[in-house]
Image (tube, grey):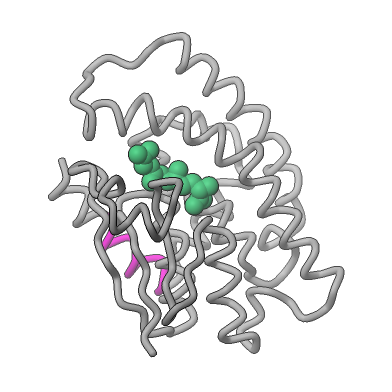
Amino acid sequence: MTIELYVFPPSPRAFKVMAVAEHLGLDCALRMVDLAKGEQKAPDYAALNPNMRMPTLKDGDYVLWESDAIAQYLALKKPQAGLLPQDERARLDVTRWQIWGVAHWDAACATLVYEHVVKPLLLGIKDPDPAEVARGMERFHGAAKVLDGQLRGRKFVTGETLTLADFSLGSPLILAAHARYPIERYDEIRRWHASLAALPAWKKTLARSAMSRASAA
Ligand SMILES: N[C@@H](CCC(=O)N[C@@H](CS)C(=O)NCC(=O)O)C(=O)O
């Protein structure tokens, strides 16, 4: 049975699950949920995901939403790849950083993505709200300091090996330039991002994501 991924490829949360699937060599069928056309609100889709947000995974009768849970599901299909370590403490470390990502990092990045990418490209609103941009910048610096500190002396987020924590926390960076993240002073984040960007799966997924962004614009 082919796993289906319902995604809007330009989104970092879609990128996360697509890149994990690509890295693992899992054969997934991509089902486009075009947020620009409001397809997330279609009754058939809302029946799969009551949040009316993407991504969503469907594997036969099994349906799963929340991008980090989807990433875990995919990683469990190929445990030997090590994206979700077998060792309990190592696995909890990955989970810890994924949860931190949702609570702090993704939330900060999403504010800037909304103001600088979603508003102009999807909603046709040209000018960002300066108060929201200031709030996004403050949140970004707060989270970036923590992540930069964690990466000091480590190749990847949880140590020397690539895990889901890297896909989860790295995915918002695909919009770093468009969303104008103030990333210049965070040397460790930039070094780590460059190593993720060199991964074949990252490159391939990014090309797919950029192509969709161009057609959505
Ligand atoms: N925590 C969720 C967030 C999902 C989410 O917010 N997706 C956004 C796009 S990045 C969406 O589908 N938005 C549609 C809408 O707001 O109508 C996850 O990680 O899967």
Q: Is residue 47 found inside the magenta-colored segment of the image?
A: no
Image coords of residue 171 (percent x, y): 48, 53
Q: Residue at x 39, y 90 (%)?
A: 1
Frontmost residue, 82 versus 152: 82
Image coords of residue 194 (percent x, y): 49, 56
Frontmost residue, 53 versus 95: 53
Relative to 143, is 50 on the left or the right? left
Image coords of residue 116 (percent x, y): 34, 27
Relative to 145, is 65 on the left or the right? left
Residue 112 higher or lower than 37, as above or below: above
Frontmost residue, 121 versus 65: 65
Q: Residue at x 39, y 53 (%)?
A: 54
Image coords of residue 9 (percent x, y): 30, 57
Q: Quadrant of ligand 1?
A: top left
Report how many numbered discs are placed on residues in the image.
Answer: 0
Q: Quadrant of the C terminus?
A: top left
The part of the chain drawn in magenta is 200-209
Q: Residue at x 40, y 47 (%)?
A: 53
Relative to 90, is 94 on the left or the right? left
Using the rendered view, name the quadrant where residue 18 is placed: bottom left
